[in-house]
Image: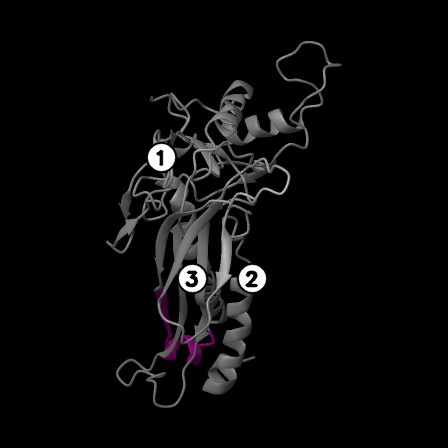
Amino acid sequence: MELNTVSQSDFTKLAKVIWLKGLNSVPQVMRGSGIVKEMPIAKHSGNTREFSEIDGEEYAKRKGESDQAERAKVQQGYTKTMKKYRVANDIGISFEMRDENKYPEVMNKLTALGKQAPNRMDLDLAHRLSFATATTYTDMDGVTVDTTCGDSLQLAYSAHTLKGSSTTFRNRLSNNPQLSQGALESAEKLAVEETFNQFGEKMTMSFDILFTTDDPNTRNMAKYILQSTSNMDQANAGVTNVYQGSYKHIVLPRLATDKDGAVDSTKKKYWGIVSSSYSTLYLGVWEEARLKTPKPLNAGEEFSTDDWNYGVRAGYGVVTVSAPWIKLSTGDGVA
């Protein structure tokens, strides 16, 4: 197709195809990791959603002959409100690009536009783990993002509280070791000894995900632990590796990043284990990433520049209600 002869309506049809190629090429690793629970939000239903936990007792009580059964206790857990926000970018396809048939430049602009909203969504999700040791962070737009759980504490902490008990629990590994077989066993020990319901009763959670950054040493260590055909700490090759098949290894390429999505080497050793079925990291999607195209009366062509304007729009919210489902280490050896 010659760009110098194409009409705006025909170019918009082409733009949608190119934009979708960019959109579909994006691996939204965090969104599809199993760590996040996603909820589509209906239009015209407000810009907030409230999430909370309700726990019942773990155990039934004795019942004597003809005695009335005990009424099971139910405890409302913590509550967290998700707020919608929108992200957007615009580009202009210049008169010169069209008139001079600069097809590669047009392709690059539109495919890049297709990636920007889903990339931002995935970055915002990953930053709930990147900034798990803080109660807030300031994002690339200068907005202060609340990263606390319902107990007003950061996601990774040494003394999370419960609503129906004075018991506290830890989900950040002591001394924050780098990933190793021994460190993984320490995380599993936390899962066994520091996982409670709101009554302070021990809960049994199945931790099925081991996540790491894309740091080669940390990533490969996870592979050694999970895929070695024998216990990696044993010289005897006939010793069974007890970790084979225990976890799904998820590499999160945006985990070790700063607020702008640039490399943050201080986070490169982050790792942890997650119970996907008990995760309370929620993504609410009000508006999936979409292409905004020129239309009559929407200033699709700028009078002064002759540009045809195209944009990407998306609307969503992220919130974390509680913390028992994740055990995390920053891998920096700091207590």
Q: Amino acid at mark 1?
A: His
Is 224 left, or right, of 330 in this rendering?
right
Q: Amino acid at mark 3?
A: Ala
| Residue 51 pos. (x, y %) | 41, 55
Residue at (49, 60) in percent of width and height:
39
Return the residue at label 3: 117
Q: Quadrant of the C terminus?
A: top left
Q: Are marks 3 and 2 in contact (CB under 8 Å)?
A: no
Res 277 quadrant in image: top right
SS at circle 1: strand
Return the residue at label 2: 24
Q: Quadrant of the N terminus?
A: bottom right
Above or below 61: residue 41: below
Magenta includes 93?
yes
Q: Residue furthest top?
A: 235
Return the residue at label 1: 160
Q: Amino acid at mark 2?
A: Asn
